[in-house]
Amino acid sequence: MNLYQIIGKWAFSASFLGKRMCFLTGPRQIGKTTLSLLHLKSLRQEKNYYNWDILGVKKLYAENPLFFLENLPEIPPPPAPNLMPKYWIVFDEFHKHPNWKNLLKGYYDEFGHFLRFVVCGSARLDLFRLTGESLLGRYFLFKMFPLGPRDITEGGNFSLKHCWYPENTLNITLPSSDFKEAVETLFRLSGFPEPFLMGRAEFYNRWKEEHISLLTTEEIRDLSKISDLVRLQTLVFLLPERVGAPVSLNKLAHILECAYNTVKTWIEALEKVYLFFRISPFMGKISRSLKKEKKLYFWDWGILSEGGKRFENFIAVQLIRTLSAWNEWGWGRFELYYVRTKEGKEVDFLVVKNGKPFMLIETKLSEVNLDPSLLYFKKRLNAPYAFQVIYHPDFLKQVTPGIFVIDASRFLYLLA
């Protein structure tokens, strides 16, 4: 079983990349390095991996800025019109070099006709790549997210034919027992590869504490000038109970006895290091929705102990995975929101396609009676589909055309 082959089919696809570089980002410990090493191993090019955290790599660069050429069996002449890159070079944590973008631009422009460059990193790479335009048009960005059930059951056998193309007629099928088991195991443990593969709650609990500590100390310190790490970690402990509800920064500032702007800075920093992500309310105009309170979800849903919040968070991550894939495959521009009225009517998630409401999703642990808010918003927003997703096994009911109460396994099998 290879948990990394689905993203690898796109991030390392010659036909998909063309001659561009691959930028591979995502949370810490999500498997970016493992994926890159597995790809190099499949090509018997393992020596072409260079990690900028390793002193020996820095020494090689100091002695020869073109050190990565030394392990290549041949260096072809200047580029022919149709010559495609032959060798892969992986630079891990390369953004920690102070002049990394100019170096990479020079490497790509001079050697891109026979080298494919892969650059791996997490929060800082995501942030630094947005500053300046020296690499514009030279790379495609791919994000690695926590595992989904297809990663586990299909791996290298994954095909777009297995996914619901949003333009096609809905085709809901019953997934295999292996797929159902994968959904249950992911929900019980985590979507991060190491604790998932260990398969033990005891190991996950230890891993979880270390992971949170890593993000709230080392990652935050590298990314920002935040010094009050004690209160920042207190903020982290306050957030799980607020999952699934609009988060008031004013209330958090009052509890922590600090300024609103301080909490805002901390929240933005924690989001950048991939502790959680936020979604905005949909109000028809993006500029208006950004002024309202956002909802917050952890990348690691295992942090949550309460079943309902954990299930909603689990589905939120799987939706983000799906929409990211649909966007990267060129199927349209997909975004995730939630919807709520001043009177309190709310649906957990709204998928917007090319600016128009496309699919509503409400999560329930076991409630099979349709939530009235789904009917209300489907009519009001004229969305083609609405799903009430439940953690109840083997359940499917079509309430009206386009509205379904559906178990999690069926729903996730429908998506990418």
Image: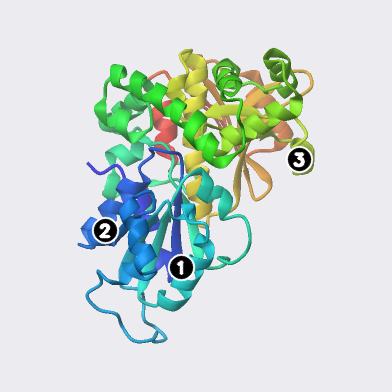
Between marks 2 and 1, how big is the CA–CA gap? 17 Å
* Place of residue 331 in the rendered image (x, y in percent of width and height, measured from the top left): 53, 55
* 29, above or below 140, in the image: above
> In the drawing, what numbered circle is on residue 136?
none
In the rendered image, the vertical position of residue 34 relative to residue 395, given as above or below = below
Q: Is residue 270 left or right of residue 406?
A: right
The residue at 57%/20% (across/down) is 230
Nearer the N terminus, badge 2 or badge 3? 2
Q: Does dot 3 land on a helix, a strand or a loop?
A: loop
On the image, numbered disc 2 is attached to which residue?
40
Which residue is labeled 3 in the image? 284
Say few, some or many: other residues with alpha carbon within 10 Å of mark 2 (under 14 / 14 to 19 / 20 or more): some
- Give x and y (percent) for residue 300: 45, 28
Amino acid type of the residue tagged 1 in the rendering = Arg
Q: CA distance from mark 2 to mark 3?
A: 45 Å
Question: Residue, x 26% and y 24% (percent of image)?
Answer: 199
For discs 3 and 1, the disc positioned in front in the rendered view: 1
Q: Which callout, 2 or 1, points at the residue further toward the start of the chain?
A: 1
- Amino acid type of the residue tagged 3 in the rendering: Gly
> The disc labelled 2 sits on which kind of residue?
Leu
Query: Which residue shows up at 57% across the image and 25% down it?
Result: 229
Pointer 1 residue = 20
Residue 31 lies, in percent from the top left, at: 35, 42
Q: Which of the 4 image quarters holds residue 376?
A: top right
Camera-side residue: 222 or 405? 222
